[in-house]
Amino acid sequence: MNKKSIYNRIESEYQKDRFAAAKREEERKKQIYSIFPRIAEIDSLIEKNGLELINSVFAVKGKEEREEFTEKIKVENEALIAEKNYILENNGFEKDYMTNVYKCPKCRDSGRVGTEKCSCYNERLMKKLYDVSNLKNKTDKENFDNFDFSFYSEKKEESEKLSPLENINNIYKICSKFVKDFESKHMNLIFYGGAGLGKTFLCSCIARELIEKGKIVVYVSAFELFDMIEREHFGKNRSEEVYDSLELIENAQLLIIDDLGTEFATNLSVTELFNIINHRLNNEMSTIISTNLAPKELERQYSDRLISRIYGNYTLLRFIGEDIRIQKKMRK
Ligand SMILES: [Zn+2]
């Protein structure tokens, strides 16, 4: 499933929800009218007043008279509504029982408030993006509980301060703490080191735990991210979808950029990445970056200001040891 069909699916979900809401409203009306005939009367009086008000534009001459008439109707309607609410509330119903039929009252299940997207729209989108990000299948297996420390050697290399096992233990603790303190503490991590050392696995663990806590997490590979940026700027396949995705990337509670360094970076995309990183730092939104590149290589590939923003504000976690994928093959 591609991104395009996600948006179509969201639209048809909303349509279905609105349809269901209309049905629910009809049912509730019927129910209430049969229990309280007076409420049916009240509603038809309110409707009648509404029509009279419209007609008064032609029927009532004179500005003052019309204002007087409008005021009279207004007072009448207020009394009718108060009576209706009184009946409902005194019989154990919410006063908006008949009209509060939407999943999201804010946008009445349209996904939009005025010209802006409703917050429920982004929630739906996030959920869908998560569904297609492969994170869902992956994270069922990849969680903190089944992190396998046995792939990390206890033997310390001479050039190192820590053994791979001690090192990964520290990283694991920092990642657990990252999740635990997520709400109260703004923190950014950069995972770097060779391939197959558990970086992506830990990214998935963190994503999974926070999603389960209801946080808005966007997980994107650097390749996808840069592709979106290029498409947005150069109008090729430019679309609302790409724009929305970029907006999500800017504003998700946690952004994870996987595999930085594998993308085709241009000046434009590096600048845009800087803007995203910067925007997130300024707004205290956490970001995790994972990369196979060493700091020296990162410096070579990206602008100085990007690198200094990252070094100055991210906790650098270096992964060491032997490629787990190769070890797994050997064990078989
Ligand atoms: Zn809404």
Image (spheres, rainbow, N blue to C red):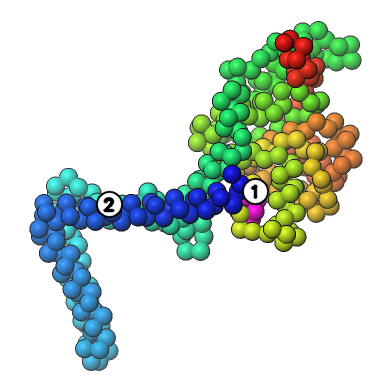
Pointers 2 and 1 in contact (C-beta within 8 Å): no
Q: Is residue 244 magenta?
A: yes
Dot 2: what SS? helix
Dot 1: what SS? helix
Q: Earlier in the sequence, mark 2 or mark 1?
A: 2
Closer to the observer: label 2 or label 1? 2
Residue at (67, 25) in percent of width and height: 201
Q: Is residue 250 magenta?
A: no
Q: As shown in the figure, which amino acid type bears the numbered disc 1?
A: Glu
Q: Is residue 258 above or below residue 27?
A: above
Residue at (79, 42) in percent of width and height: 263
Which residue is at the front of the view, 290 or 66?
A: 290
Q: Is residue 155 above or below residue 269?
A: above
Q: Measured from the top left, where is residue 95 in percent x and y?
A: 23, 53
Q: Measured from the top left, where is residue 111 in percent x and y?
A: 46, 55
Q: Residue tagged by mark 2?
A: 24
Q: Is residue 168 left or right of residue 298?
A: left
Q: As shown in the figure, which amino acid type bears the numbered disc 2?
A: Arg
Residue 218 figure quarter:
top right
Q: Report how far apart the C-alphas of labels 2 and 1 lie in the structure.
A: 37 Å
Residue 287 can be seen in this image? no
Residue 169 figure quarter:
top right
Q: Is residue 164 left or right of residue 122?
A: right
Q: Measured from the top left, where is residue 24 in percent x and y?
A: 27, 51
- Residue ranking furthest to the top: 155
Q: Which residues are magenta?
A: 242-246
Prevailing SS of the magenta stretch: helix
Q: Is residue 66 left or right of residue 164?
A: left
Q: Quadrant of the C terminus?
A: top right
